[in-house]
């Protein structure tokens, strides 16, 4: 299957037969919108395993590829002269990681061309995150690009797309306050905890799951001086993540004991089933002798049974509750997000304009080559012709094929053919600065 993409840009094909096809962007992925955490956990490629994973993709024919794995999304971003075929190969590489699992058909999505570019722009600008404006995703995307670069799997169109995304994300961060909104929601969660428990230094918090929104809230608790922050969860990666983040790991099999020791519980698993219910929280409260527990559910879908909120001394907040408490920040974030989205749209227009300009280059090259061939043919056939005769013959040769084609279109006479003729006339006017008289218009 080698040869799905050879990193082609505008120019002439290898055999010289004409313009080489340009690489086009594509994306294959699954995110928190299409796949639960159980599936995302299986798809996730650990950082140390990324080079080997990319090498396997390269062996399958995917020569230009970035592998992005986060808690909330796993995506393969690539370019190819045949993106439909390449995306099929990419999806098969991802599905192979789910062998033995029952996976809904809607788990994976594929995006091409402008849709793929827009998606990358929105990811880099934190507009496609669970918590709009969170700052982690840009760093994760940059790390993924670096790994791809080290593997020799990013150049040309793909590199241009990524560098443009980074520049856009920097402009969004520097000219809007979108990141402040994400912080305001997390800060609101800390304020609730302080109102309930007082100083954070005497509190112990437990983060369940690896979702990025929960991680952002946990980071805010660390900044507020939380005494102890533990990490647990059903994912196989939790213990390694705890070591990486410098947190205390708690065995998920002993969750009841960890709950009993926690003043604050933040859930961020989103596995599609409740991790905590009334029975488990009641046991924890009994062990704590009814000392209150603040529970913040940042899971998508929810991790905590809403019935927990009816228990005495259990204070349950969903992200919607937190957003309401940070209402001003939420409204500000919506305004900032709208401004950031407008910047993404503007960048997308610039990208499409640049792409159109670059796609026009092969046509001009082919046209020049065709004219040169015609010129050589005229000179070879009429070696004794003077300049006036030679140029007249050349003009006739150049216009012969276009003239025959236009006459054929006009003679067929259908409405579609008429539209084609009008389009050709408009293009010729723009290309050669002509003023073409419309024969249908009234003459003076």
Image (tube, rainbow, N blue to C red):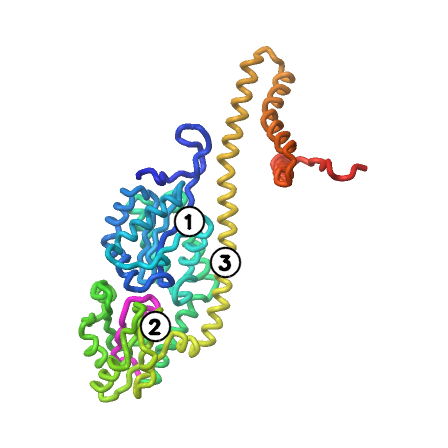
Which residue is more in the foreground, 260 or 347? 260
Q: Position of residue 182 (x, y in %)?
A: 40, 69
Q: Position of residue 185 (x, y in %)?
A: 40, 73
Query: In which quadrant is the C terminus drawn?
Result: top right
Which residue is more in the foreground, 91 or 20? 91
Closer to the eye: label 1 or 2: 2
Which residue is more in the foreground, 204 or 277? 277
- Residue topped by disc 2: 302
Mark 3 neighbour density, 10 Å: few (under 14) some (14–19) many (20 or more) = many
- Residue topped by disc 1: 161
Q: CA distance from mark 1 to mark 3?
A: 16 Å
Residue 393 inside the magenta-drawn segment: no
Q: Quadrant of residue 282?
A: bottom left
Q: Secondary structure at mark 2?
A: loop
Asked whether residue 202 appears in the rendered view, the answer is: no
Q: CA distance from mark 1 to mark 2?
A: 35 Å
Q: Secondary structure at mark 1?
A: helix
Using the image, determine if residue 387 lies above or below residue 49.
above
Provide the residue span drawn in magenta. Answer: 199-222
Q: Earlier in the sequence, mark 3 or mark 2?
A: 2
Residue 213 inside the magenta-drawn segment: yes
Q: Position of residue 283 (x, y in %)?
A: 22, 83
Q: Quadrant of residue 123?
A: bottom left
Residue at image position (33%, 55%) is 68
Q: Secondary structure at mark 3?
A: helix
Q: CA distance from mark 3 to mark 2?
A: 32 Å
Query: In which quadrant is the N terminus drawn?
Result: top left
Q: Are marks 1 and 3 in contact (CB under 8 Å)?
A: no
- Residue topped by disc 3: 343
Residue 180 is left or right of residue 49, and the answer is: right
Residue at image position (23%, 68%) is 234
């Amino acid at each position: 299957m080698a040869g799905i993409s050879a990193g082609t840009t505008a120019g002439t094909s290898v055999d010289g037969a004409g313009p080489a096809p340009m690489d086009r962007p594509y994306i294959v992925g699954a995110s928190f919108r299409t796949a639960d955490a159980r599936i995302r956990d299986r798809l996730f490629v650990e950082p140390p395993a990324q080079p080997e994973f990319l090498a396997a993709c390269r062996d399958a024919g995917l020569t230009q590829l970035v592998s992005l794995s986060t808690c909330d999304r796993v995506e393969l971003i690539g370019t190819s002269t045949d993106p439909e075929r390449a995306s099929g190969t990419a999806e098969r590489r991802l599905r192979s990681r789910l062998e033995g699992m029952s996976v809904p058909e809607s788990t994976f999505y594929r995006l091409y061309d402008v849709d793929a570019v827009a998606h990358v722009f929105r990811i880099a600008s934190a507009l496609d995150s669970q918590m709009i404006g969170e700052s982690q995703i840009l760093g994760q995307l940059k790390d993924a690009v670096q790994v791809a670069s080290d593997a020799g799997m990013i150049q040309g169109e793909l590199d241009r797309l990524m560098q443009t995304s980074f520049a856009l994300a920097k402009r969004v961060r520097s000219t809007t306050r979108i990141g402040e909104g994400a912080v305001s929601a997390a800060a609101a969660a800390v304020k609730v905890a302080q109102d309930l428990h007082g100083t954070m230094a005497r509190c112990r918090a437990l983060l369940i799951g690896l979702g990025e929104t929960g991680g952002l809230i946990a980071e805010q608790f660390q900044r507020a001086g939380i005494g102890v922050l533990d990490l647990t969860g059903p994912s196989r990666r939790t213990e390694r993540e705890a070591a990486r983040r410098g947190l205390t790991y708690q065995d998920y099999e002993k969750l009841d004991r960890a709950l009993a020791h926690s003043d604050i519980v933040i859930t961020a698993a989103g596995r599609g089933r409740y991790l905590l219910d009334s029975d488990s929280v009641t046991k924890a409260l009994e062990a704590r002798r009814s000392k209150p527990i603040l529970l913040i559910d940042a899971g998508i879908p929810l991790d905590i049974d809403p019935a927990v909120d009816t228990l005495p001394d259990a204070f349950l907040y969903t992200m919607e509750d937190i957003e309401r408490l940070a209402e001003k920040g939420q409204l500000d974030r919506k305004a900032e997000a709208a401004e950031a989205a407008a910047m993404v749209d503007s960048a997308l227009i610039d990208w499409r304009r640049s792409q159109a300009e670059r796609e026009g280059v092969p046509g001009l090259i082919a046209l020049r080559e065709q004219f040169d061939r015609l010129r050589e043919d005229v000179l070879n056939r009429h070696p004794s012709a003077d300049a006036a005769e030679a140029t007249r013959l050349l003009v006739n040769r150049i216009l012969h094929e276009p003239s025959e084609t236009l006459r054929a279109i006009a003679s067929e006479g259908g409405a579609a053919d008429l539209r084609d003729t009008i389009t050709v006339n408009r293009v010729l006017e723009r290309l050669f600065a002509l003023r073409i008289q419309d024969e249908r218009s009234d003459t003076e």
